[in-house]
Image (spheres, rainbow, N blue to C red):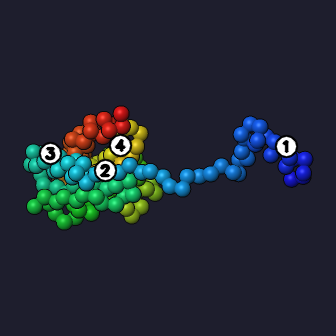
């Protein structure tokens, strides 16, 4: 950069408040919304209760935006494997920001997502979103039908969705 260009750039900054593109500063931190423990527990309990009404005992996992378990509930007779599967469904729904039921066809198509270790591409996982923000995911496992798992996960989301939407107003 020659002297003339430098002087013109400085004049533009002073006169118009313009800043060079390289000088744009990134924030030092970002705010990430998270579910409170009480809200995550309310979601998990509502999902578990819906599955009990369906006559099945399951595991329910709520993960935060980072994919870490926040609440894990396993009914008395739910198999141990349901813990891992419910966590994977919740993680998958959060990571892809879509219901895991919408990913099932990718498993059958031989898509590479089907072999990723932490993903689980069967119904029963839903993202937790409100006001354009993703809070995490919920996963349910243990019923004979993945559709029933998804119904229970939906009941959990329904138990908190109005509260989450109202908080953004």
From the viewer's perspective, tell me whether residue 53 is left or right of residue 69.
Answer: left
Instruction: Identify the residue position indicated by label 3 in the image.
Output: 50
Disc number placed over residue 18 in the picture, else none: none
- Residue found at x 33% / y 46%: 128
Which of the marked residues, 1 or 3, is nearer the chain's N terminus? Answer: 1
Q: Is residue 93 visible?
A: no
Q: CA distance from mark 4 to mark 1?
A: 48 Å
Instruction: Identify the residue position indicated by label 4 in the image.
Output: 129
Q: Between tags 1 and 3, which lies in front?
A: 1
Which of the marked residues, 4 or 1, is nearer the chain's N terminus? Answer: 1
Instruction: Identify the residue position indicated by label 2 in the image.
Output: 35
Q: Between tags 1 and 2, which lies in front?
A: 1
Which of the marked residues, 4 or 2, is nearer the chain's N terminus? Answer: 2
Up-down relation of residue 75 to residue 147 (above or below)? below
Dot 3: what SS? Answer: helix
Whether tag 1 and tag 2 are in contact, CB under 8 A, the answer is: no
Q: Between tags 3 and 2, which lies in front?
A: 2
Whether tag 1 and tag 3 are in contact, CB under 8 A, the answer is: no
- Residue found at x 31% / y 56%: 63
Up-down relation of residue 73 to residue 9 (above or below)? below
């Amino acid at each position: 950069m020659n002297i003339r260009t430098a002087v013109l750039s400085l004049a533009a900054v002073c006169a118009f408040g313009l800043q060079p593109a390289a000088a744009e500063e990134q924030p030092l931190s970002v705010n990430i919304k998270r579910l409170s423990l009480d809200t995550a527990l309310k979601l998990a309990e509502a999902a578990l209760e819906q599955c009990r009404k369906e006559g099945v005992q399951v595991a329910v996992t709520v993960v935060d935006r980072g994919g870490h378990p926040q609440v894990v509930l396993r009914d008395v007779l739910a198999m141990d494997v349901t813990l891992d599967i419910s966590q994977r469904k919740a993680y998958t729904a959060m990571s892809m920001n879509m219901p895991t039921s919408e990913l099932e066809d990718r498993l059958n198509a031989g898509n590479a997502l089907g072999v990723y270790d932490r993903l689980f591409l069967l119904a029963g996982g839903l993202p937790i979103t409100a006001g354009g923000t993703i809070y995490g995911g919920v996963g349910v496992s243990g019923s004979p039908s993945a559709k029933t798992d998804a119904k229970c996960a939906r009941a959990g989301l329904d138990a908190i969705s109005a509260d989450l939407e109202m908080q953004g107003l």
